[in-house]
Each structure stands twice: as C-alpha cells, then as structure tokens.
Image (spheres, rainbow, N blue to C red):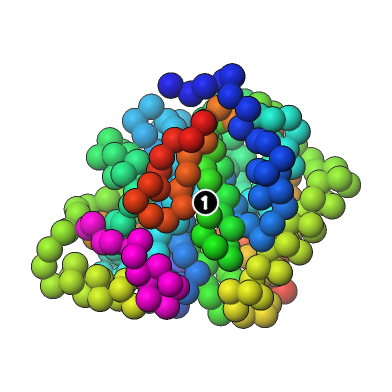
Amino acid sequence: MSLSLAAISRCLQGEIPSILATCSANGEPNVMHVSQVLVVDEHHVATSNQFFSKTAANLLENPVATLLCPDPDTGLSYKLLVQHARSESSGPFFEAVRTDLDAIATMTGMADVFALRAVDIFRVLDASEVPSRGTVQRG
Amino acid sequence: MPSTAAHHIDDELRAFFLGPVSSMLGTADQLHTPDATRVAGIAPLTSTRVRVLIAADAAAAQTNAALGARCSLLVTDITNYRSIQWKGTVARESHERTPGDLAVMHRHIDAFDVGAKQVRLLPGVVHALFPVDVVALEIELDSRYDQTPGPGAGRRVA
C-alpha cells in the first residue's frame, strides 16, 4: 500500500459519505454511497451494508471493489482498492457498528431508513490519494 | 434487460442535474476491477445521452471508459439524499474539453457549493473535491434506478 490506513483515518468517520464501486461478473459497474467506512486493523476496513442488494450480489460474483473516501477537513479524496473478505451480521464488531450508525442516522434525521443488515469486511490491497484542486493548492 | 426505448432524462431530471448534486462515474477494467471517479459536470445531450466531465488525470476511468464499455452514473442531491443511478454504455470516449464544458463544470461546482453550505461542509472542502482540469466523455443511458436511502433503494424505475 502506498498509504497506511492510519494516515487516512480522518476520511473513515462518515462525515462525508464514501463511495463503494463494485462490478458484476459480466462487467457492469455499480456505485453506491456508504454511510461509514471503518478501520478494522492495519490491513482491513469495513462498510455498513444497509440497503445495497446489487452491491452484495456483485461482491458474491466478484469480490474486488473500490472505495473512494473524502476527507471532511480538506476535501482530498483517497481511493482504496479492496477485496471482500467476509460479512458479519452479529457479534461485537457488528453491534459496535450498529451503535455508530444509529448515531449518524439520528444526526441526519434518517433513523427510520438506516437499518444495518451486515458489516462487510474488506482486505485493503492498495490506498492512494486522488489528485485534486486541493492537491495543487497544497503543493 | 436494459430498455433502450425509455426516455430517461426529462425536464425534471435535467433540473435535478443542475441542483446541488454529487455525482460519481463507475467504470471497470477488462478484469472487472471497478473504479469510481468524481464527476465535475453533467450535460444532457438527448433524453438518453449525457456528456460527463471527469478529471483529466483520472487515468483508470478514462482507460476503462472505452467505446462500448458499460458504466454507471450515480447522482445524489447532497441536501436531501435523493439518489439516482443510471447504467449505460460509453458512446464517445474521453476527449478534450470545450469552453462549453468549462461553463458546465463551473455551474456544477457552484450549485454543489450552495448545497455544501446547507449541509455545513467546511469552507474550502468543495474546492478540493473537484479536479484541476477535466475531459469529457459521452454515455448512452439505458436504465435508471432509484438509490435514495431506504427500503426501496436499488429499485429500477426505467
């Protein structure tokens, strides 16, 4: 990985929704917002699976995905190439994510529509910064 | 099966494009590795074709978006989460932007900026979300899905 997850942890707190791109076995991409991307350990992240059945179907067919995560402080975005490892629908990690998500749902007035189905765990294969106007200004 | 007969972009959706929207282009390479890149402007050309502006340095998206490649376009109003995803085919590969494209890009960013204030994004963040320069590509849309958060998310609507 060109960037560590610790270096971009600020992007993974759900203030600006991240994007999850998947692709079906026949090559059709699908793009979804995800409420939160969480760091599991130095090589894994997790996303909350709330309503994206097409994404789940794609991940069964093709486990490779891309996450686009904006930093809410700078606007800089980071791209994570990930591989789906497993889904969890119970247990301590799932419950912790549900607690966080409930807080986000309450803050955004969407408590009635944010129902956590599962937490998807991904192995991070690569992480890189997306060039932007902010990159140029900063440089 | 995608429907090529349905008209997917009506006046209401044209207005939607002009609002405070965040838009993403999804593409995939020949190994079906998906990529997402931020769209910096959308201009409907017909009821089923759009001209889309992406970063000039979005190498993966530009390579993936070969003529005839499948792609997706997700458009979300950042003030109310209304989200629509279109699926379609690349009808014209990435090419140099025109002065008109620049006008579309600035209009897109200005509208996003208005919405960003409403949702209290930090000042300066909007500027950094968008690319330094853009190229254009065209997509022929053939299906549309409601992806507004909720139980109906993912429902095909056209």
Q: Nearer the viewer, residue A90 or A132?
A: A90
Q: Mark 1 points at which residue?
A: B83
- Magenta segment range? A104-118
Query: Is residue A113 located in the magenta-colored stretch of the structure?
Result: yes
Residue B15 image offset from top left, x and y in percent: 71, 48
Residue at (40%, 43%) from the top-left corner? Answer: B154
**A76 or A111: nearer the viewer:** A111
* Residue B30 place in picture, x, y as percent: 45, 31
Q: Examine the rendering and report whether any part of residue A137 can be seen.
A: yes
Main secondary structure found in the magenta portion = loop
Residue B139 seen by the camera: no
Percent position (x, y) of residue A53? 31, 44
Query: Is residue B123 covered in magenta?
Result: no
Given the image, what chain letter belongs to the residue carrying mark 1? B
Residue depicted at x 47% and y 65%: A17
Instruction: Specify few, some or many for label 1: CA neighbours under 10 Å numbering under 14, 14-19, or 20 or more.
Output: many
Which quarter of the figure is the N terminus of chain B placed in? top left
- Image quadrant assignment for residue B25: top right
- Decide if residue B79 is on the left or right side of residue A79: right
